[in-house]
Amino acid sequence: MSFLYSLKSFLFFSATLILISNTTKAYVPSVEGLAKLVSTQHGKGAYQIQQKIFFSGNKYTLNETWFVNKGVLKLKSSYKNTFIIYSSNKKQVWQDLKYFISPIGPYFYQRFFLSQNSYSFFNAAKKINLYKNKSFSHLLRFNGKPQYVINNLSKIYKTKTPVKYGPNIIIDNLKFYITQILFKTNTFLQASNYKKFANNLWFPKNIQIFFDKQSVTISTIKIKSISAYKFNQVKYKKESKSEFINNKSSKTLLKFLKNFR
């Protein structure tokens, strides 16, 4: 009797585990649901973000300071004393006393890490051809652990790994951080070492970008919350000298600025 009871208990327990496993495996948040979960990690209000960029071989470094408020981004760069204001599809650029308007780089990624709502997230996603109503969400094992993927494939197979098939966004399945963005084959970024900053902003301390067999490392130096008034006061200011005065800059540097800025 005891044996039968144990057998029934074991079978019931096994069936329950299978049911729970199948249910867990079946549940994946929608694309919009993932966008909202990611955006809740991006704090509230305005921020000032200082970063340093290291290029392959440490031949060049750039200092950048970003300012963000309600989806508007401003950038101060040490490259030719550059100041940029980003709108949805274009950027206003002041550079060595010159002013011009140009398209935003096709792989501009900053909004993915600073979107405070799903609307801003999808505006960023459109730049890499991922659309709210045409994309799909998946859960699969990547880099040794389960992660969510947003891409344009209705089904995803073991042979179609996120590393090779883009565009896609890979998201941590527990904390909803973006860990990788694949723009196209062999052009991608990886974000790691997330830290919590003011007003519940979770932001990566390290971002690595890979393109044309080159790599660029971006280190976050400091982040602080600022007032909307201070954000509005951030404008172009002529500096006494800029970090890059000559025109013989690295091709890697210029390609990075064109595509990612």
Image (cartoon, rainbow, N blue to C red):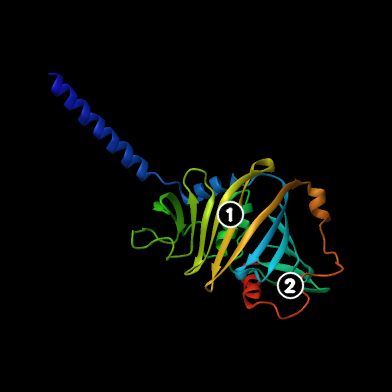
User: Relative to the observer, which residue lies in front, 5 or 221?
Assistant: 221
- Which residue sits at x=64%, y=57%? 219
Residue 62 location (% of width, % of height):
70, 65
**Mark 2 neighbour density, 10 Å: few (under 14) some (14–19) many (20 or more):** few
Establish if 44 lies above or below 180.
above
Residue 7 location (% of width, % of height):
17, 27
Mark 1 or mark 2: whose residue is earlier in sequence: 2
Residue 166 location (% of width, % of height):
46, 65
User: Relative to the observer, which residue lies in front, 174 or 222?
Assistant: 222
Q: Quadrant of the C terminus?
A: bottom right
In-image side of 50 versus 38 (left or right)? right
- Looking at numbered disc 1 in the image, what kind of residue is underneath it? Phe
- Looking at numbered disc 2 in the image, what kind of residue is underneath it? Ile
- Which residue sits at x=71%, y=81%? 248
- Which residue sits at x=39%, y=61%? 161
Establish if 197 lies above or below 170.
above
Classify mark 2: helix, strand or loop: strand
- Residue behind mark 1: 121
Could you give the CA–CA distance between mark 1 and mark 2, rounded to whole angstroms?
Answer: 24 Å
In-image side of 96 versus 160 (left or right)? right
